[in-house]
Amino acid sequence: MATAVYFEVGKKKVFACAVDWPGWCRAGKTEDEALEALDLYVPRYAVVTKKAGVTFPKSVSANFDVVERVKGNATTDFGAPGVVPKLATAKLTKAQAERQASLVDASWKVFADVVKKAPASLRKGPRGGGRDRDKIVDHVGNAEYAYARKFGVRHKSSPDPKAVAAMRKDLLAALEAARGDGMPEDGSWPARYTAHRVAWHVLDHVWEIEDKSE
C-alpha cells in the first residue's frame, strides 16, 4: 500500500511528512529531496515504531502518495514545519487516537534512551554552533509546554523533570481521548497536527544528538 504524505512548501525548504506516522517528517530544498530524506530515515523511525509496538511495513517507502500540499511560511524556511494541513482536521477513531498517542510516547522514550547514552558535550557545527546534550533536553521540554497549550493542555513551564513528565502525561491523555472535528476556531491545533509536531520536534533532536555524539 502507498504511504500518504503531504508537502509543506516554503521558499527555501520543503517538508515531506507521513500522514499516519507522527514524527516521520524530513526536509529538503525540493519535493524530491524531501522524499529522499524521508526514505533515508526509515531505519531510524523504525526504532520508534518498535518501541511503540506498532507494525512498520518494510515497504513503507516503496510508494509515496502525495495527498496534500500546503504553502509554507517563515517557520518552514527556518527549518521547522509550521503550517496545519487540512488533512490534520479529519476525525479520529478511538484506535487511531490511541495509535498516534503511542507513537508520540515512544518518541519520548527513544529520546530518553538516546540522552542517557549521549556525552554531555556534543560535536559542534560550523563556527561552534549547536547545543550540548542538557541544553537540548531543556529546549525540548520547554517547547512542549507551548505545544501542549496549543492543544488545550496548560502547565506552568518548568525545567524540573517531574514537571515535564506531568505535562507529558496530561498531553498524552488528551491525545488518546481526541477525536477531532475540523479546524479549531481559536487558533489551537487539532489532535493530528499536535501529535505530528510534538513527535517531529522530539525526533529531530534525537537524531541530532545521535549524529553529534559520533
Image: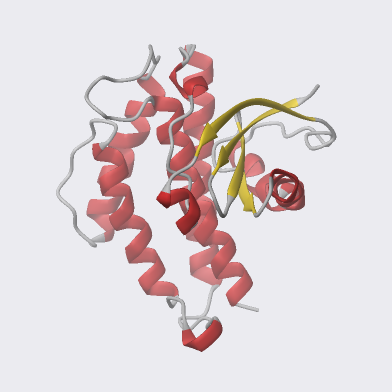
Write the residue at 79% across / 37% down: 61
140 vs 168: above or below: below
- Residue 90: x and y in percent read 47, 15
Q: Nearer the viewer, residue 83 or 206?
A: 83
Q: Is residue 124 above or below residue 173?
A: below
Q: Residue 66: percent from the left, percent from the top?
A: 69, 28
Q: Is residue 178 visible?
A: yes
Counting from the top left corner in percent of width and height, residue 67 is at: 65, 23
The structure residue drawn at horizontal position 22% and vertical position 52%, both measured from the top left corner, is 163
Quarter of the picture containing the C terminus is bottom right
The answer to whether 158 appears left or right of 183 in the picture is left
| Residue 123 visible in the snapshot | no
Look at the image and tell me in which quarter the N terminus lies: top right
Residue at 65% of width from left, 53% of height from top?
Answer: 28
Front one among 123 and 115: 123
Picture coordinates of residue 140 (x, y %)? 37, 58
Q: How is the image coloured?
A: secondary structure
Decide which of 197, 135 is in the foreground and name it: 197
Tally of marks: 0
